[in-house]
Image (cartoon, helix red, strand yellow):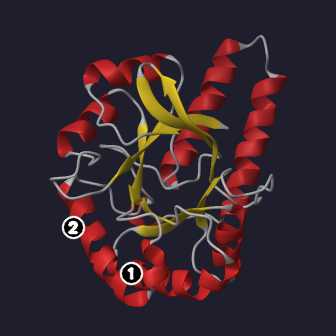
Amino acid sequence: MAKGFDCATALTSSTIQPFATQGFKFVGRYLADAGSWKRLSPNEVKIISAAGLYIVSFFERSSDRVKEGALAGTEDGKLALQYAKEVGQIAGSAIYAAVDYDAPSRDFNAIEAYMRAFDKEIDGYELGIYGSYSVVKAMYERGVATKLMQTYAWSRGQKFAPIGIYQYQNDIIVNQIGIDLDESNGDAGGWKLGMAVAKNGFSLDDRVTDYILDVLGDYWKHMEGNKDVQEYTHQVSNSLRRAVGRPEE
C-alpha cells in the first residue's frame, strides 16, 4: 500500500520535502475558489509534482452539502470542473466529492442524486466519493462510482474491500502540519504534472492489471539478491501503472 496524507494547509517547497523524504507517495488537497484558504493552487501543483508526490483532488463546500441533492450536485460539479482546469489537473484522474458527516441511510437517495449530477458536470474526470463505510458501500452498490475513499470515522470498525484509499487517522501533526493519514492501493485516480493517463485509449480491466502486478511482485521477491533483475521488474511494474493511469510506487 502507498503511504499518503491529506491536509487543508497549502504546501510549499520546504513543507512538502519532509513528507517526500519519509516515503509519502500522495497528498489529498482541495479544489476550491481562489479566495479559499485551503485551496490547491497552480503553483502548489508544481511544487507537489516536483517533489514526486501524486495529488488526490477533493471537493467539499460544506460537510453535508450532498444532502441537497441533484441541484447542488450540478452546481458543485460545474465549480469542480472549473477549479480542476484552473490548476491543470490531468484529464482522466479523479475528483472526490465529500460526504463529510455521519450520513444516515435516509440521506442516501439525496447523496446519490447529488453524486450523479456532480458526475455529469466533471467532463473528462472520474467521480470519486469520500465518506464512511456505509456511504461508500451504498454508492458503490448503487453503481454511482468505483473510485472510493473511506474514512475510519463513522465507520464503526468496518472497512469496505473495494476502496482505493483508506483514511485511518485524523487530525494529527506531522512535520508541523495538521494532516490526516491515508493509504492507497495505487488505483485511486491521483495525478501529477507530466503523468500519463490511459494514452490512446489503452486500458485494462482492474482485475487483470492487479493480477499482472501481483505476478511481477512475486517475481521481484523471488529474485532477492539479484538487484538488477529486481530493478528491471520494478520498472516494468511502473510502466504498466503509468499506461493504465495508476501512480507509480
For marks 2 and 1, the one nearer the N-term is 1
Tell me where residue 75 appears, x and y as whole percent.
29, 80
Residue drawn at the location 61% of the way across and 39% of the way down: 237
228 to the left or right of 171:
right
The label number, if any, that marks residue 241 in the structure image:
none
Q: Is residue 249 visible?
A: no
Which residue is the site of mark 1? 73
Task: Find numbered disc 2 in the image and state the secondary structure of the residue it sits on.
Answer: helix
Q: Quadrant of residue 55?
A: top left
Across and down, in percent, residue 52 comes to: 40, 30
Left or right: 105, with 247 as reference point: right
**25 lies above or below 145:** above
Does the image show residue 192?
yes
Is 98 situated above or below 108?
A: above
Q: Could you tell me residue 137's position as x and y percent?
A: 71, 70
Q: Is residue 205 left or right of residue 77?
A: right
Q: Residue at x 29, y 46 (%)?
A: 38
In the rendered structure, which amino acid carries the disc numbered 1?
Gly
| Secondary structure of the residue carrying numbered label 1 | helix
- Front-most of 61 and 48? 61
Q: Quadrant of residue 27?
A: top left
Quadrant, the N terminus: top right
Q: Quadrant of residue 10?
A: top left
In the foreground, 196 or 150: 150
The disc placed on residue 82 is 2
